[in-house]
Amino acid sequence: MSSLQVLCSGLPLRPLPENRGRQAGVPHAPVRTPGLSLVEKQLALRNALRYFPADVQELLAPEFAQELQLYGHIYMYRFCPDIEMRAYPVEQYPCQTKAAAAIMHMIMNNLDPAVAQFPQELVTYGGNGQVFSNWAQFWLTMFYLSKMTEEQTLVMYSGHPLGLFPSSRSAPRLIITNGMVIPNYSSRMEYEKLFALGVTMYGQMTAGSYCYIGPQGIVHGTVLTVLNAARRYLGIEDLAGKVFVTSGLGGMSGAQAKAAVIVGCIGVIAEVDKAALEKRHKQGWLMEVTDSLDRCIQRLRVLQLGLQQAPGWAGLPAALGLCVLSYLVDLAPLGEGRCPAPWGFSRPLPGAPVLLLCPSREARKRKEALSLGYHGNVVALWERLVHELDTTGECLVDLGSDQTSCHNPFNGGYYPVQLSFTEAQSLMASNPAVFKDLVQESLRRQVSAINKLAKEKFFFWDYGNAFLLEAQRAGADVEKKGAGRTEFRYPSYVQHIMGDIFSQGFGPFRWVCTSGDPQDLAVTDELATSVLEEAIANGVKASVKLQYMDNIRWIREAARHQLVVGSQARILYSDQKGRVAIAVAINQAIACRRIKAPVVLSRDHHDVSGTDSPFRETSNIYDGSAFCADMAVQNFVGDACRGATWVALHNGGGVGWGEVINGGFGLVLDGTPEAEQRARLMLSWDVSNGVARRCWSGNQKAYEIICQTMQENSSLVVTLPHEVEDERVLQQALQL
C-alpha cells in the first residue's frame, strides 16, 4: 500500500502500477454516452496520453481506449492509488507550506469512499460532481502541492493542474476554474463531448473546489429548510407527527433521512439504488428500510379498532379464538400458520373469528421521529399516496420535495419509474433517446401525483435540483400563470423558505479541523456557540435571533447525531458578524494551542454571494438580473484579493451545466495576526457583496441589513435603490 510520501512524489511510471481495473463492491458512475466520432475518440485518447512519456504510451493506449469505449470517459483506473483514501492529519503530508497540506487534506476527504459517491470515478456527489477528470491529474496535483512554496500559486483548469506559477505571499496558493466554457457552447450535449475529451469538467459546487464535508452540510441546510417550511406553510414550530416525503439517499441527498429525525418529523425517502440506501442505513442515518409500499403506508398509520366480519365469523361466539393482530411493522415476522395481509389481519385457526384492525396514522399519532427508506422509485410512492387519498380520503403527507440529481436527468440523475434500476442503467447506455423519453414520462407522472395531493393541505417545494425545470421541459403541468421565467406552480425553497435568510446575510459557513482530532472540533463547537450566545445577549433583531437560536440548537445536537463523515468538520448558518467573530475566536484558540492544528474556513457555494442561479440561489431576485452572473464572478475575484488561501469558479452546480455560475473559497487559519486580518477582510466582503446585490434588486430585508452594515463600517459605501412609489408614473410613461 502506498504512503503519503509516495502519493506526493509524482505520477508512478517506473514501474507502472498494476492495472486492477474497476474495483468490485463499490458504487460506480453510470456509463456516459458522449457520442464521439472516430476523430474525436482519437483526440480524447491523445489528450489522455499526453500526461505520460512515450515509452509507456503503447501500453496505456489500449486500456485507455477500452475505458472510453466501455464507460464513455478515460478515468485511468490503473492509477487509482493503492492507499486508504481519507483526510489524514495535516502534519503527515509532505509539504513546504501548511496551506498546501491543508488543501491536500481537503482533496483526500472529497475522495474518501465514506464521503464520495463514486470514488473510483473521482465523483464526490450529485452523480457527476468531479474532483478531477482522471487519476493522473490527482497525482500531479498532490506532487505540486507538496513542492509549493509561499511564493507560488497552483493553477487548475477543470481538473488539470496547469502548473506552479510565481506569485506573492498575499496571493492565493491555489486558483481553480471548472467548466468555463464559452456561453454559446455551454450545452449538455457539448459538455458530454468536452468531458470525454478531457478538456473540461463539471465540479458541481464543493466537489471541484475541494470543500465538501460529507452530507453534514446538506443535513444542516435541510434541517433549516424543513423547520422554516413548517413555520411558513403549516404555522408550527413543532414538527412531531408531520410527514415529509422526498427522494434521494446518495451523495448530498443522503442527508434527508438524518435531517428528518433532527427536526422531529417522519421522513420517508425513496431511493432506487440499493447500495446508496444501505450505506445510509449502516451509517445510522436511516432508521428503517423497506422495499414494500404497503409497509411504508402501514408505518405511517395507527391501528384504530374496528370490528369487521371476516370468513368464519358468522355464528361463532366472540370468545372463541378471537384474535387481535397489532400489525406494527417493527414487530418480528408473524409465526407459522398466520397469514399476514396488507390490511393486517391474522387467522391462527381455520374458521376462527377475526378482529380486523383498520390502520390509520401510526407514526403520526405516536408523534415519533422516523426516517424510513423506501427502496423503490419515488414516483411509485407518490402515486401510492394518491391512491390512499382517493380510497380513504386521508392525505398521509404534509410536506414534500425532491432531491434526485435532476440537474443530470438523462445520465443517472433521475431514474424512470417504468424500469428497474439495472434495466435503467442498461437502457441509458444502449438507447439514450428511449431512456430520455421514459424519464420525461416519469417526470410527468410524478408531477401529476404531486398536483393531486397539493389540492389537500400538502405543500411541495423545489429543492433547487432542477426538478421543476426538467418537469417543465418534459411537458408536466408545472406552469404558474402570469409568472416570470423563474417561477413555477410550486416555489423553489429559495423563493419561499431560504431567500429571506440569504438576504439577511445568513448562509452555510463551515470549517474543518485539519488535525483530524474530534477534540479540536469540540472546541470549535464551544467557541461558535459562545459567539452566537454573546451576540444574542448584546441584542439583535428578532429575525436574526431566530436564526442564531436555530444554529445554537444545531451545534448542541450535532455530536449526539454523529454528523461527522470524513473530515472533522462543522457547518452552521451565520451572517457576516457571526462568521467574522467565529473565525477570530478559532484563530485565537489556534494561537494559544487550544486547537492543535490549522483550521480551514469555507462555505458551500450555495450562499449569500457565491452563486448566480436563476432557478435556485437567485430565484427570488425579480429585477431581471437573476440570469446575470456578475455577483458570483465578483465574489471569486474579491475573495482572491482579500486573503483567501484558494478560490474556485464553476459553471454548473445544483441545477446543472449551463444553468449556474458559482464560486467558493478556502481560508486557512493558522493562529497568526495575518490570518485574522485576512479573515476579517475576506469574510466581510464574501457576505456584503451578495447582500448589496440583493438590496439593489429590491429586497427590503437586504436593504435593512446593508444599511446597518454601512453604519457599523464607514469604509463600506453601497449604492442604494430608490423605489418607484407611484406605479402610475410607469403606466403613463408607456402610453405612447
Image: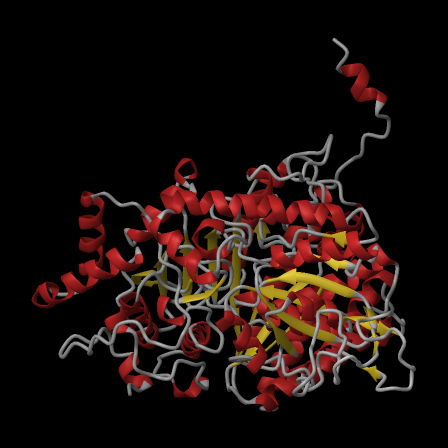
What residue lies at 40% left-to-right and 63% top-to-bottom? 29
Q: How many marks?
A: 0
Name which residue lies at 75% across and 85% down.
349
Q: Is residue 116 above or below residue 527?
A: above
Query: Residue 55: x and y, percent?
Result: 7, 67
User: In this view of the protein, which residue sits in the foreground, 270 or 323?
Assistant: 323
Q: Which sits in the foreground, 55 or 365? A: 365
Quick check: can you spot residue 618?
no
Relative vertical location of residue 94 with respect to residue 373 in this rendering, above or below: below
Relative horizontal placement of residue 281, taking residue 502 as reference (left or right)? left
* In the foreground, 618 or 92: 618
List x then y, in percent, for residue 290.
Answer: 61, 73
Residue 89 placement (x, y as % from top left): 46, 86
Residue 188 in the image, given as x and y percentages of width and height = 42, 44
Quarter where residue 687 is shown: bottom right
Q: Quadrant of the C terminus?
A: top right
In the image, residue 138 sits, relative to residue 3, either above or below, namely above
Q: Quadrant of residue 182?
A: top left
Give the left or right position of residue 522, taking residue 648 as reference: right
Q: Nearer the viewer, residue 340 or 19?
A: 340
Asked whether residue 150 appears in the rendered view, the answer is yes
Query: As drawn, is 58 to the left or to the right of 440?
Result: left
